[in-house]
Image (cartoon, rainbow, N blue to C red):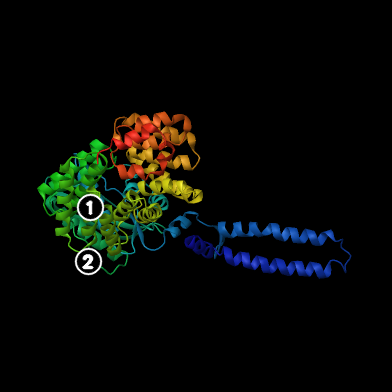
Amino acid sequence: MNDFMEELKRRKVIRVVVAYIIVGWVLIQIAETTFAPIGLPPWTLTLVIVLVILGLPLAAILAWGFDITPEGIAKDDGGRLRIAIAGGPSIAVLPFPDMSAEKDQEHFCDGLTEELLNVLTRIPNLRVASRTSSFSFKGKETDLKEAAEKLQVAHILEGSVRKSGNKIRVTAQLIEAETDSHLWSETYDRELDDIFAIQDDIAAQILEAMKFRLGTDDLPKATTDNSTAYQYFLRGRGYAISGSKREVELSAEMFQKAVDTDPDFLRAWLQLAEQSSIYALFFSKDKKWRKLADRAATKASELAPGQAESYLAQGYGHATSERFVDAERDLRKAVELDPALGRAWHHLARAEHHQGKSQQAIASYEKATEFDPDDYESPLLATNLKFAADDVAGARRTAKIGVERAARILQDYPDNQRAYYLGSGGHFVLGNMEKALQWTERALALNPDDPATRYNSACFYAKFEDTHERALNLLQDSVISRTWIENDPDLDPLREYPRFKEIVDALPE
């Protein structure tokens, strides 16, 4: 709303409306004092008042759509609103294409783009377009101004990668979108094993071009300089996206290989702790998963003592063993140290949900939504809790955010059943019943035996009395977290069924 008011001021809409009201009032006063003495009928005064009132919205619309310039009246560029709304310094990193003759450097290009995003997101007061949004432009001919408008940023970083033997050439340029002017460009010719120096150098140059007073020493350092470990890390990230039992397991395997290759790879240890925790909570009571999560949490704490990442890792470890009070404490400490740490807010909300603290969980999910523009899960999980609490307006607001983000994920990962089944709940709240049913059925078609898919589909079918039997069938052999099921309001319509109680009683302690 503040951004919208600023845009009204920029377009001089408020000034025009105030001036119009003053002039209109003066005209009405003149009409009232002169029409009768000169013999005009009474209805003429009414006509003036009506015309003045009808002209007000027209004046506001014209002020919004047109600017008075030295060359005369010109149509305002509507795109400027979207860029203005971004507020403050903002940037999008478009995927660097592989220009090599062999076309064999796609992994390298994606890794470079992702690392640049990771570095830039740690810079205070710099808003960075999400990875999902940026990668939607991968492989496409892109008009940079249109891309900036779509991504709601003022600056675009683009470039390319070309490999020849063990040499690599990286070109990068920073562009101010509204003026289409180049703020900075550079070409790097390096040995292939020098990629991490290239990343740091590019990030430092961008910050200088955007008039930040941070040197290279102030930038977060890459957490590995081992390209093999980084390849395992990227694969693990890819598997983690779907949230299915099998792919959570595969992602943990990839992160394990990453830390085996580079034992000091902090981000990989954090991801290993998170995926192991999720697997232990929802899919298996095998003690190896708890041990793996605890080991990963301990190692991450050793690598980042006293930092937000340390407390995030400890939170994962506590949650794995269902010590949700302890998990909540450490995750809250993580967000105190780094309020923009979206994953910490997300898992804090989960820890609160396991304890039945619905209102606190809603607040934490909303923080996760605010700080992580790729996170479609948090707004959709918050939607369910709000809807159950009869906050229909709030539920619709977060549902809209969640559905839009899920749809973006599905553009890049069309077989992501998690985006479908969580997005289905958002469509339900928005009244898109046909879409909600389609997304649920699509998730089931993609992975009918996956416990998480079965569970969330059960939540959808629990909403309708004539499909309660199907909901119970899906709930059978789904996730194993008793505390999550006990505190999920989506399942309230099923709780009085004897079969529901049997399903819950059969869950492992």
Residue depth check, mark 2 versus mark 1: number of the one nearer the observer: 1
Does residue 128 show up? yes
Q: Secondary structure at mark 2?
A: helix
Of the pair 183 and 327, the residue shown nearer to us: 327
Q: Are marks 2 and 1 in contact (CB under 8 Å)?
A: no
For the residues labelled 2 and 1, the Cα–Cα distance comes to 32 Å
Q: Residue furthest right?
A: 39
Of the pair 62 and 57, the residue shown nearer to us: 57
Quadrant in which the C terminus is drawn: top left
- Residue at the image position 19 percent from the left and 60 percent from the top: 221
Total labels drawn: 2
Q: Which x, y percent locates residue 475? A: 34, 34
* Residue 126 placement, left or right of 64: left
Does residue 189 show up? no
Of the pair 71 and 27, the residue shown nearer to us: 27
Marking on residue 296: none
* Residue 166 placement, left or right of 502: left
First along the sequence among labels 2 and 1: 2
Which residue is denoted by mark 1 in the rendering? 318
* Residue 251 placement, left or right of 228: right
Of the pair 234 and 104, the residue shown nearer to us: 234
Mark 1 nearby-residue class (10 Å; few <14, some 14–19, many ≥20): many
Which residue is denoted by mark 2 in the rendering? 218
Mark 2 nearby-residue class (10 Å; few <14, some 14–19, many ≥20): few
Q: Secondary structure at mark 1?
A: helix
Q: Which x, y percent locates residue 312? A: 24, 56
Give the amino acid at mark 1.
Answer: His
Q: Which x, y percent locates residue 36? A: 86, 67
Give the amino acid at mark 2.
Answer: Asp
Q: Which x, y percent locates residue 267? A: 20, 53
